[in-house]
Image (cartoon, grey):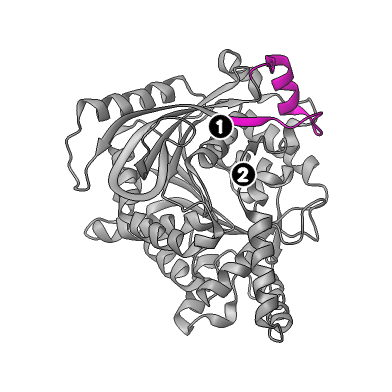
Amino acid sequence: MFLAVMKTSFRNTLKEQRPLLALFRFFLLSTVVLLTACPSTVYLMPTPELLRTGQRDPFAANPEQALSPEVEVAYATNRSPAFDSGRWPYITLFDQELRLGFSTVRLGSETLSTDDLHASSTAAERESSVPLSLIDTQEYASLGATQDSSLTKEARAYFDRINAALERSRDPDITIYLHGANNSFYRSSAQAAQYAHFTGRNSVVMLFSWPSAESFLRYAVDVNNARRTVPVFARLLELLAQHTNARYIDVLAYSAGAQVLSPALATLRAKHADKDENTLRKRFRLGEIYYAAPDVDFGPFLQNLATYDGMVQHVTLALNPNDSVLAFASRHHEVSRAGRPDPDELTEEETRLVQAAFNEMAFDLLLVDPDKIPGLARGAHDFWYNHPWVSTDVLIQLLFQARPSERGLIALEDERGRRAWTFGQDYPQRAGEAIEQLASE
């Protein structure tokens, strides 16, 4: 059923595009760029569904930090540093160094009161937008390109500070946010900070900021930089496993962030090919691997998944089969994306991997269907944070390490017994019941 939905959507798109003239293609590309380009200021995402009713207040669990307008997130980056430490402390150029530090993002203007911030963070409709500002960046350490088991004093201080945050946190896991293309250090810091905010400040969140060129007109540069970043990110995962006390290391990869995460996990597995999967699962403690609208080649994504499946706790692929941004990316790469797949492109072996993913792997496919989710734009790409239902599901999954059946989602099953998950029309009620059950356990 769900594969047929994706296939029909893809074929209809092709039929519509065949007769288009070059001029119209240019116009379409320009429109996509305008619609998806980063605004100069990031504003607080819509309040997740379960925080809107007033019945649940995650901020009450951590009152000392919850009402502060400042949110601190750890960061790691392989961007080159800028000459100043203002809003743009790192630029778009690739750097072999792995730089570690902490950034501070302020929610709202300097005059926003704590009561108003709390009201804005629990309201279904806000009286005004809440801007996010990067107000401070502290780089602790810079590690060279070669792997070295010993750490500098500065790097040890960085990991000690993360461990201290884990000690205070109600959530024993680290969540890494991997941004997509067309992103600045400021924008990705703001995205990571607002996710941390809506956990009730109860989670330790880390941003990995790879050197995106910050423009869809330079998308090819982003693709190249993402490819070059793969070994750097794999190294970061090893360092976190070795030097932090996190129970699990979760990774949320958005859009082109999947071009870093997917091959990095395969690289990590290949590097330790002499170890069995159970040993690696205990060593690296990789928990929830969440791909939100992944902009990565569909076939290689499946091949990578098959290599690292047993090394992680669980993998989720969340997709909108009508994703307009990934339609553009498919034309650029001349192959469908994992977040908007075309099953007809797959080889016989890759088709077998699809079947194995559903039947044998710790893998879930989440269909974010605009026809079933009220208020979701048909071509939505940013659904993981910009729609209250989906952001609620992301929070429940990462905070509780919960499976779809435990989160209030509905199962879809085709004639071959392959199961996917989606949102029912009564999702708010189902999610509320699910979180009450998870919290009690």
Badge 2 crowding class, 10 Å Cα cut-off, few under 14, some 14 to 19, many 20 or more, is many
Looking at the rendering, which quadrant does residue 271 occupy? Answer: bottom left
Observer-nearest of 286 and 106: 106
Q: Disc number at residue 246?
A: none
Q: Position of residue 115 (x, y in %)?
A: 72, 15
Q: Earlier in the sequence, mark 2 or mark 1?
A: 1
Find numbered disc 1 in the image and state the secondary structure of the residue it sits on.
helix
Residue 179 visible somewhere in the drawing: yes
Question: Which residues are the magenta region?
Answer: 110-133
Observer-nearest of 57 and 39: 39
Looking at the rendering, which quadrant does residue 400 occupy? Answer: top right
Please tell me whether residue 10 is drawn above or below residue 87 in the rendered image. Answer: below
Please tell me whether residue 41 is drawn above or below residue 9 in the rendered image. Answer: above
Looking at the rendering, which quadrant does residue 40 occupy? Answer: top right
Find numbered disc 2 in the image and state the secondary structure of the residue it sits on.
helix
**Distance in Å between CA atoms under marks 2 and 1:** 12 Å
For label 2, the residue is 394
Question: Type of residue at label 1?
Answer: Ala
For label 1, the residue is 196
Q: Is residue 327 left or right of residue 357?
A: right
Q: Is residue 271 left or right of residue 222?
A: left
Q: Position of residue 187 (x, y in %)?
A: 55, 41
Residue at x-position 70% and y-position 51%: 409
Observer-nearest of 36 and 314: 36
Residue 204 lies within the magenta run: no
